[in-house]
Amino acid sequence: MIFLVVLCIILTSIVDISFIKLYDLTSKKNISMDVKRIAFCLMVFVCLLLQLILLRYTRNVIKNESKNITQLKLFNNIAYVSYCLTILLISILIFQVFYFNYYNSLILILIVLITYGTASSFIGKTAKLLIGWYKRNHGFVILIYLISMSLIIFNLILTNLVVNVYLSERPVKVREFVGGSMDLTAGKFSFLIYLHKISTVLSFFSILSATIVLSYSSRDELVKRLRYLIMPSLLLVYFLVSYFSQDIFTTIFASLLQSDPILFSSILLMIFILIKPVGGIMFGITFWNISKMVNYEKTLEKYLIITGYGFLLLFSANQSTSLVLGPYPPFGISTITILIIGTYLIMIGIYTSATLVSKSVILRQSIHQITKESNLLELIGTAEMEKEVNKTVNKIIQETETSK
């Protein structure tokens, strides 16, 4: 059921972003404004409802199987508060669109601040955990995931800044307009855009490198080892080509662009719009593979699957730059709300997996004997165990000194 929920969220996100990507390539008269408003509301409703199902599912998992991990309840409350604030703001936005035939740009700015701010805090907590584990256990896998999380935080913060700077330059009240989208800043923030592009490429490349390192195992047969290198390499080429498609295809396919620019551009957009969901699947597969290896421990298996879903949702949702030149009504809002649940799943999945492994000697020994794919679990589990031991020892020392 959870797999179907995640799948529906991704499909809704793809449709949502497609409205923006194809906005300047289609006639504004093909779809009436009433239909656009209804489509916008429907996608928002479906997306938020499916996220609520994921939040409730995760809360039940924490309540039933993680009674000793009280810190998770705080993170769960933060996710719920952010989700509720997002619903409130989107409700105001929908009311404005239907009743006043405009929406206030400030509402979009607040939604972006909440979603990206919450996402940054969850990834920041994950990075903080990785720093603590790396100090106790200097594993290369932990280090490369720490670098990846740091670059993702940087990209989320920079995206938050770029989008809100551009939104602040738009009219206070955004209404229906006939023409195409345009950059109202006249290139004033070109450096920020360039920096954002670099951070996006670096964050994508870093998590891809971490996936290769985590997945690669010298004990596997040659075909499997090649697969772990070829598949991510193809994904990287796909990402780079899609990200710089305008520069590449303008030169290579100049004649086709001149003969039928709308059709050719539409085909390219529909092909490359899948790059981030495909990347998310690639990053999630590694954790899903590990979950199969430890399926004898159902709780751990569940949290590893949750982590994989988190990476899939994170990379599918991080597309708020589309809001900068977005049409009316503001398609793209549904997609960025997914960031909260995506980063939340990553944080609790990694944290709880480490906690579960740290509490079981048998589980750590079993993981050590499986393959190098589970090396991250072993490293962070051992580091978390050492941290808890140090806490216990320090507590005993303090109690002893107090009794004296």
Image (spheres, rainbow, N blue to C red):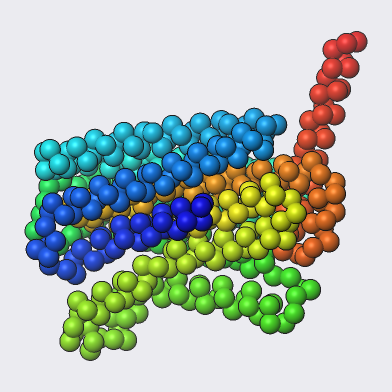
Q: Nearer the viewer, residue 291 or 386?
A: 291
Q: Is residue 385 left or right of residue 117?
A: right
Establish if 234 lies above or below 183.
below
Q: Is residue 340 left or right of residue 36?
A: right
Residue drawn at x 45%, y 71% is 239
Residue 102, horizontal then vertical, whole percent: 14, 43
Establish if 382 lies above or below 286.
above
Establish if 49 lies above or below 276.
above
Residue 230, horizontal then vertical, whole percent: 59, 79
Which quadrant of the structure image shows residue 184? bottom left
Q: Is residue 83 left or right of residue 167?
A: right
Residue drawn at x 35%, y 79% is 248
The residue furthest top is 404
Residue 389, horizontal then vertical, whole percent: 82, 35
Residue drawn at x 22%, y 79% is 263
The residue furthest bottom is 255
Q: Nearer the viewer, residue 293 or 137?
A: 293
Q: Is residue 301 left or right of residue 45?
A: right
Any part of residue 141 in sight: no
Which quadrant of the structure image shows residue 108? top left
Establish if 235 lies above or below 20.
below
Any part of residue 37 in sight: yes
